[in-house]
């Protein structure tokens, strides 16, 4: 993993458009780089449900598997825009790691169908490498 990565924090413009503010974060420990970066995203983005925690982050080939606690689904209360903001924040942040091509969102070690019924999360998603505001 690199020595730093970017997290992508969803922002709504005054015109109501969804954009992402990128924020560079230093990686303290290469052994736990993925977990470190996504824990920072959870803390700073404001889009994760109350109590949601990242249990583990593992790499299988070019796929980053993010295993969250059940609160990611059980406490999710948003609509389709909120679900898209959270999923895009995850896939964009995963895209800041050059070796990662896909990200799979798991809950308690198992694939989930969706967070709020709007986006199919049963398979790994391609990562995005957005043009974000610095």
Image: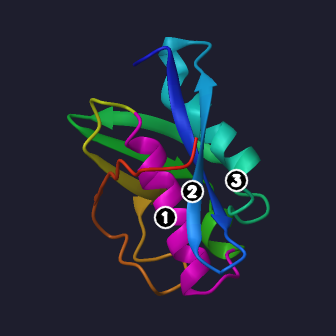
- Residue 7 in percent (x, y) is at 57, 41
The reply to whether residue 107 is in sight is no
Dot 1: what SS?
helix
Left/right placement of residue 106 relative to residue 59 reads right
Callout in the foreground (3, 2): 2
Dot 3: what SS?
helix
In the picture of the structure, the residue carrying the numbered disc 3 is 45
Quarter-of-image position of residue 124: bottom left
Question: Looking at the image, which residue sits at the far front?
Answer: 15
- Give the crowd class for mark 1: few <14, some 14-19, many >=20 residues within 10 Å: many
Image color mode: rainbow
- Residue for point 62% across, 27% down: 25
Q: Nearer the viewer, residue 23 or 61?
A: 23
**Label 1, label 3: how many angstroms apart (C-alpha)?**
12 Å
Q: Which residues are magenta?
A: 76-96
- Residue 36 in percent (x, y) is at 61, 29
- Give the crowd class for mark 3: few <14, some 14-19, many >=20 residues within 10 Å: some
Proximity of marks 1 and 3: CB atoms separated by less than 8 Å:
no
Dot 2: what SS?
strand
**Label 3, label 2: how many angstroms apart (C-alpha)?**
10 Å
In the picture of the structure, the residue carrying the numbered disc 1 is 87
Mark found first going from the N terminus, 1 or 3 = 3
Q: Nearer the viewer, residue 127 or 71?
A: 127
Proximity of marks 2 and 1: CB atoms separated by less than 8 Å:
no
In the picture of the structure, the residue carrying the numbered disc 2 is 20
Question: Looking at the image, which residue sits at the far right?
Answer: 50
Q: From the image, give the main secondary structure of the stretch colored magenta.
A: helix
- Residue 49 in percent (x, y) is at 72, 66
């Amino acid at each position: 993993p690199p020595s730093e990565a970017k997290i992508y924090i969803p922002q709504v413009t005054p015109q109501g458009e969804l954009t992402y503010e990128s924020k560079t974060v230093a990686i303290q420990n290469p052994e736990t780089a993925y977990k470190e970066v996504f824990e920072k995203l959870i803390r700073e983005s404001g889009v994760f449900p109350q109590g949601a925690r990242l249990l583990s982050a593992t790499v299988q080939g070019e796929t980053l598997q993010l295993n969250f606690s059940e609160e990611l689904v059980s406490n999710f209360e948003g609509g389709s825009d909120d679900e898209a903001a959270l999923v895009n924040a995850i896939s964009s942040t995963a895209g800041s790691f050059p070796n990662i091509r896909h990200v799979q969102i798991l809950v308690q070690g198992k694939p989930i169908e969706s967070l709020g019924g709007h986006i199919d999360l049963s398979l790994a998603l391609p990562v995005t490498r957005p043009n974000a505001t610095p």
